Image: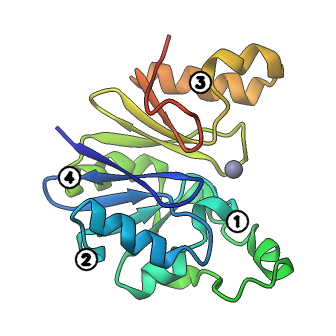
Amino acid sequence: MTQIIQLKYGNTKCYLLKGTQKNLLIDTDWAGKLPQFFNELGKKHLKVQDIDYLLITHYHPDHMGLTTDLMKLGVQLVIMDCQKDYVHQSDYIFKKEKNPYFQPIDDQQAKQLNLSGSQYFLNQCGIGGKILSTPGHSIDSISVVLDSGEAFVGDLYPQEQVPLYHDKILSHSWQNLISQGARFAYFAHYANERVNLA
Ligand SMILES: [Zn+2]
């Protein structure tokens, strides 16, 4: 059973999945939050060396701001094929706010992964699960679904709000999640830690 550790050191809930072989971090917070990140790791009795891989649910600034910092500390970024054209979509926001901490991601240093290879990749980490493309909040949104039913969905709009949006892409993402075994959702900003799915 994969251990799930929530890391919150700003406005984004990030999740560390501890596999039997490797550990995978899902999302980071905003650029400049590195001290808060270390502080949160310390509280959870973790070191940055405990993080092998980083996966970003979508490349909005409050999910990927620390990516380059973590890569420089030895964490391997995993970019899904459906995300590769969107990795730099938030760079302009950090530029606009003249954020001195932000460094653009060096895509060349990242591991590129196809959705079809996600199950194999996670299995090698000792994590039973798969990665799905779940657009709706943004085109590059992905979700991690564990075999035990936990789904890490980033900023995907909650399931009960789907009828409000009249958005086929969004409804399809939820159908896909459910058909792939998602039973509990973990959101990045939702108040509840874990939401039961219908
Ligand atoms: Zn977002």
- Furthest residue toward top: 198
Q: Give me the C-alpha separation between circle 1 and circle 4.
A: 29 Å
Residue that appears at 38% across and 71% down: 39
The residue tagged 2 is 49
Q: Pointers 4 and 2 in contact (CB under 8 A)? A: no
In depth, the one of 99 and 175 nearer the eye is: 99
Circle 1 is placed at which residue position?
A: 85
Judged by depth in the image, the label closer to the viewer, 2 or 1, is 2
Mark 2: amino acid: Gln
Alpha-carbon span between mark 1 and mark 3? 23 Å
Where disc 4 sits, the SS reads loop
| Residue that label 3 marks | 174
Quarter of the rendering occupied by the N terminus = top left
Tell me the amino acid under the disc marked 1. Answer: Asp
Task: Check whether the beta carbons of the residues at disc 1 and disc 3 lie within 8 A of each other.
Answer: no
Quadrant of residue 129 within the rendered picture: top left
Q: Secondary structure at mark 3?
A: helix
Foreground label between 1 and 4: 4
Label whose residue precedes the other's in the sequence (1 or 4) = 4
Up/down of 84 relative to 158, above or below: below
Q: Which residue is mark 4?
A: 19
Query: Looking at this view, is 132 or 136 the one in front?
Result: 136
